[in-house]
Amino acid sequence: MVDRWPSDTHRDAATSFQPTRQADRGARMTAFPEALRKWNQASSAASVSESDLARVGIQMHIKDDAVRFHFGAARNPSFAVGLTAFCVFWTGILGFQYVLGVPWIFQALTLLIEPLFIVLCLDLWLSTTTVTIANGLVTRRYVVLGVACKRFWPGDEIQGVLFKMGGQMQGRTGTPYYNVRALLQDGRTTMLGPRIRDKRQAEWIAARMRMALGLPPAPPLRTDV
């Protein structure tokens, strides 16, 4: 399912959230497309292109003063396969416990953990996340198995966009995965872009989200690391 661009209703809703103290930020948001073009030309981060993101299931679209990031399903198959294999293994343990007559308390504990692995597997294989920044409003739409959950944040409630490592396969020597998160005014963070395998791409996305929100841009990415 593909979201439509912000409708008049969405724009009306966004108007009620417009900040009263951020004229400068509003001007930067209006100039976002031109600022993005210049930033791409001047920054070493231009080594990360939209086609690079598309190859790993991430899409970025710009229309007028709105920008959308779409994080597709099954973007990290190796991670998903590994977790699915462990989920099957865990289910096998539960079966052996039943056959061997293990005390019910241990079977119950194993059974209680099973749904967690199933939910994580569904999230890795089937979920999509779409983040739209338009008219001073940030919208995140999460969909799994046709069930959608949508949340909104006024732009002035977000003081920064950062990225950090959210998980790693096979311990410290495995592949790290990064999450792009919004830093809210009350100090809490909320997920915007989940499980990005490439650190440079995660920083690229975070920088463009900051730009779309009218926040100060991040310094150019280093290419010598």
Image (cartoon, rainbow, N blue to C red):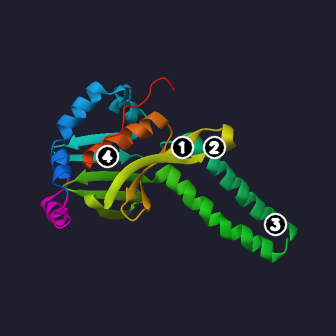
The residue drawn where x is 18% and y is 66% is 13
Circles 4 and 2, Cβ within 8 Å, touching? The answer is: no
| Disc 1/disc 3 C-alpha distance (Å) | 34 Å
Q: Secondary structure at mark 1?
A: strand
Q: Nearer the viewer, mark 4 or mark 2?
A: 4
Name which quarter of the figure residue 23 lies in.
bottom left
Q: Is residue 110 visible?
A: yes
Q: Amino acid at mark 2?
A: Met
Circles 1 and 3, Cβ within 8 Å, touching? The answer is: no
Q: Amino acid at mark 4?
A: Arg
Residues in magenta, as a range: 3-21
| Disc 4/disc 2 C-alpha distance (Å) | 29 Å
Q: Amino acid at mark 3?
A: Gln
Circles 1 and 2, Cβ within 8 Å, touching? The answer is: yes
For disc 2, the neighbor class at 10 Å (few under 14, some 14 to 19, many from 20) is some
| Disc 1/disc 2 C-alpha distance (Å) | 8 Å
Name which quarter of the figure residue 22 lies in.
bottom left
Q: Nearer the viewer, mark 3 or mark 4?
A: 4
Q: Which mark is residue 117?
A: none
For disc 1, the neighbor class at 10 Å (few under 14, some 14 to 19, many from 20) is many
Of residues 92 and 14, the one drawn nearer to the viewer in this rendering: 14
The residue where tag 4 is placed is 210
Q: Is residue 73 visible?
A: no
Residue 9 part of the magenta segment = yes
- Residue 164, percent across and down? 50, 47
The residue where tag 3 is placed is 97
Q: Secondary structure at mark 3?
A: helix
| Disc 3/disc 4 C-alpha distance (Å) | 51 Å
